[in-house]
């Protein structure tokens, strides 16, 4: 046990080098109605916009935002859908090759929801030069889903190039990845299928929640090429080269890329060689973060995650306060190690 705690401490005290490409700020959300953007996805039919959604507390609407300015081009009212806790959004073609917007109503902080929902609607054509047009679009497909082990909190959705959606759960220190079964008519409840497990470690990257923020999943994405699968925490993005199925992919070593310090970073999209990330908070910034490897050259062995260097010079909030949170988490961990070592010595 002492050895295991020692390895955890070594990971927690990891100090990375310098020289990673800097993230760039794309824009800030101009629309004051976008207060809790917990997902982000770039359009396929409308590549000039990013789609974002607020999580719990908002109505059944999606915002299409000009990718250059952050202005809202259109507000999409999703008829036939209800926003209980929309935690993530994706844009990908479905299994009939229809470009679609996917909405994951999967948030469950209290662990009480016996079923969660996934909505799919056909992606519209949107001119990014529009200014806050209102559109009404119906749900094309709705899933009623349950976890095999009962109510579970989750904030992350990724949709593969074959139209298969995946949900990534949120728990301290790790996440379980589930595959969504093919849609069936009639609103019948279907059971999610477990495909793999992710174990996070402390990275030391600044974020508002310290150690907790480094080891809890808040967003996921699969690149439009299908070559890259990624899961973000409040502080970093964990990037895998896709090798066969997602289950096979998760057996290999990811690259861990530090993200800019955001108020409450949750959304993730993948564009070519960049991760695009947003954050909850009015008028928060959206960043493009370079990924340090060509997707075809990401590692495929099963050793420890590779740590990229931290970004510099980009923060939406007081980094001193955030490092206090990180330092507090480190201090608590070191204290735990001391207690374990002392107890072991007394037993001897």
Image (spheres, rainbow, N blue to C red):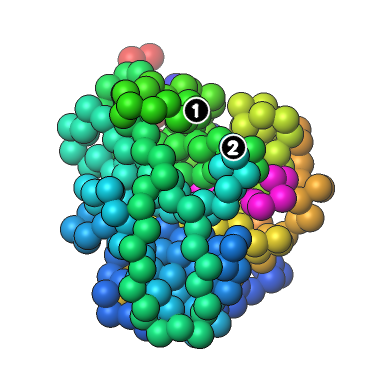
Residue 302: % across, % down: 70, 30
Is the residue under label 2 in contact with that under label 1 (CB below 8 Å)? Answer: yes
Residue 340: % across, % down: 35, 28
The residue carrying pointer 2 sits among few (fewer than 14), some (14 to 19) or many (20 or more) residues within 10 Å by Cα, namely: some
- Disc 1 marks which residue? 182
Quadrant of res 96: top right
- Disc 2 marks which residue? 95
Residue 142, compared with residue 261, is above or below; it is: above
Quadrant, the C terminus? top left
Q: Secondary structure at mark 1?
A: loop
Question: Left or right: where does residue 16 sit relative to residue 176?
Answer: right
Nearest the eye: 344 or 126? 126
Q: CA distance from mark 1 to mark 2?
A: 9 Å
* Range of residues picked out in magenta: 218-227
Quadrant, the N terminus? top left
Residue 57: % across, % down: 18, 58
Quadrant of res 243: top right
Name the residue rendered at 45%, 64% in the picture: 51
């Amino acid at each position: 046990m002492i050895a295991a705690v020692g390895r955890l401490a070594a990971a927690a005290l990891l100090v990375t080098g310098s020289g990673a490409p800097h993230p760039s700020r794309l824009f800030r959300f101009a629309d004051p109605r976008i207060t809790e953007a917990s997902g982000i996805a770039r359009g396929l039919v409308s590549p000039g916009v990013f789609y974002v959604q607020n999580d719990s507390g908002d109505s059944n609407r999606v915002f299409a935002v000009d990718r250059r300015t952050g202005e809202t081009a259109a507000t999409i009212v999703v008829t036939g859908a209800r926003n209980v806790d929309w935690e993530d959004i994706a844009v990908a073609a479905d299994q009939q090759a229809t470009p679609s917007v996917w909405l994951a109503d999967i948030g469950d902080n209290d662990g009480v929801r016996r079923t969660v929902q996934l909505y799919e609607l056909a992606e519209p054509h949107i001119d990014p030069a529009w200014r806050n047009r209102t559109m009404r679009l119906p749900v094309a497909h709705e899933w009623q889903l349950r976890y095999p082990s009962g109510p579970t909190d989750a904030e992350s959705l990724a949709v593969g190039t074959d139209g298969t959606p995946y949900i990534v759960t949120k728990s301290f220190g790790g996440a379980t990845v589930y595959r969504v079964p093919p849609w069936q008519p009639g609103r019948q409840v279907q059971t999610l299928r477990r495909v793999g497990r992710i174990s996070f470690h402390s990275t030391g990257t600044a974020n508002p929640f310290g150690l907790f923020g480094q080891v809890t999943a808040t967003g996921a994405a699969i690149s439009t090429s299908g070559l890259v699968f990624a899961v973000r925490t409040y502080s970093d993005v964990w990037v895998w080269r896709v090798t066969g199925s997602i289950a096979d992919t998760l057996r290999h070593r990811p690259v861990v890329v530090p993200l800019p310090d955001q108020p409450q970073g949750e959304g993730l999209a993948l564009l070519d060689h960049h991760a695009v990330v947003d954050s909850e908070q009015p008028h928060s910034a959206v960043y493009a973060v370079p990924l340090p490897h060509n997707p075809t050259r990401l590692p495929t062995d099963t050793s420890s995650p590779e740590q990229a260097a931290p970004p510099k010079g980009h923060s939406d909030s007081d980094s001193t306060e955030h490092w206090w949170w990180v330092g507090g988490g480190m201090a608590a961990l070191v204290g735990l190690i001391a207690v374990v070592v002392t107890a072991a010595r007394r037993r001897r």
